[in-house]
Image (cartoon, helix red, strand yellow):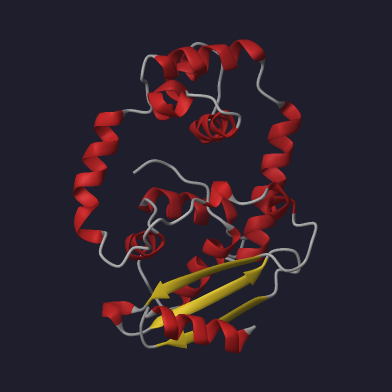
């Protein structure tokens, strides 16, 4: 599974699952990300005491991204990255080679660059290794039951939502309990970072909707 940037809501879910003594692998399964993504998040964003605080973790990540944008990536490095992508290299392979040739760039930045190119109508995303995508897909077919039909990607949301300039934009998700023992509905208001949770007995759409209405 490729690296994925965590949302602020997912960071609150990690904190909640950690308090419930879930293992890193189980947390990764609940969030549908790789265990290395969760491990990296805790390693990079836990405070000195070892305690993980989702609001501070998100602030630290946002600060690093802002600093990274200020530093920027030189044009020659961007050209090299796009050349390797056109040869169907993975972002992880490209990052390793760029480091060797003296043009260091993280695989996280490469994935972000692909997403930005996709939003502009580019085709870099078409060069991600198709065989690996199909392999991951086959492994996860049995997990597709209960998934939302025609689910829209977070990348399709209006740009203003990402700026957190207005109140009323919510990140809403569900966390499944151990061995299917109940579901926690979570809702995070992006600007104020006001966070509410409610336990329900299943992921039934009506039950989740009732919980959201009651919380909000």
Which residue lies most toward the front here? 150
Give x and y (percent) for residue 33: 39, 53
Which residue is drawn at the image coordinates 19% and 46% (left, top)? 138
Position of residue 158 in the picture relative to residue 142 (left or right): right
Q: Looking at the picture, does residue 47 appear above or below residue 111?
A: below
How many labels, in total?
0
Foreground residue among 92 and 214: 214
Which residue is drawn at the image coordinates 33% and 60% (left, top)? 25
Quadrant, the N terminus: top left
Q: Looking at the picture, does residue 66 appear above or below residue 61?
A: above
Which residue lies most toward the right here? 165
* Residue 50 visible in image: no
Position of residue 22 in the picture relative to residue 173 (left or right): left
Quadrant, the C terminus: bottom right
Position of residue 58 in the picture relative to residue 18 (left or right): right
Foreground residue among 76 and 82: 82
Give x and y (percent) for residue 58: 64, 57
Give x and y (percent) for residue 189: 68, 69
Q: Quadrant of residue 128?
A: top left
* Residue 115 visible in image: yes
Q: Quadrant of residue 183?
A: bottom left
Give x and y (percent) for residue 89: 37, 21
Which residue is drawn at the image coordinates 39% and 23% (left, top)? 127
């Amino acid at each position: 599974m490729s690296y994925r940037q965590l949302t602020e809501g997912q960071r609150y879910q990690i904190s909640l699952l950690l308090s419930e003594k879930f293992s890193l692998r189980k947390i990764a399964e609940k969030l549908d990300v790789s265990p290395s993504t969760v491990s990296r998040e805790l390693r990079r964003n836990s405070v000195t005491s070892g305690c993980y605080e989702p609001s501070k973790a998100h602030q630290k990540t946002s600060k690093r991204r802002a600093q990274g944008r200020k530093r920027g990536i030189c044009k020659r490095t961007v050209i090299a990255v796009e050349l390797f992508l056109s040869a169907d290299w993975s972002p992880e392979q490209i990052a390793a080679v760029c480091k060797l040739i003296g043009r260091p760039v993280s695989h996280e930045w490469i994935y972000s660059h692909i997403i930005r190119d996709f939003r502009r109508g580019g085709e870099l995303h078409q060069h991600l290794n198709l065989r690996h995508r199909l392999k991951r897909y086959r492994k996860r077919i049995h997990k597709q039951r209960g998934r939302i039909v025609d689910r829209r990607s977070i990348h399709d949301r209006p740009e203003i939502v990402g700026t957190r300039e207005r109140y009323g934009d919510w990140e809403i998700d569900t966390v499944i309990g151990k061995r299917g023992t109940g579901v926690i509905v979570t809702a995070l208001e992006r600007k104020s970072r006001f966070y509410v949770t409610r336990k329900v007995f299943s992921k039934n759409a009506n039950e989740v909707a009732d919980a959201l209405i009651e919380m909000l």
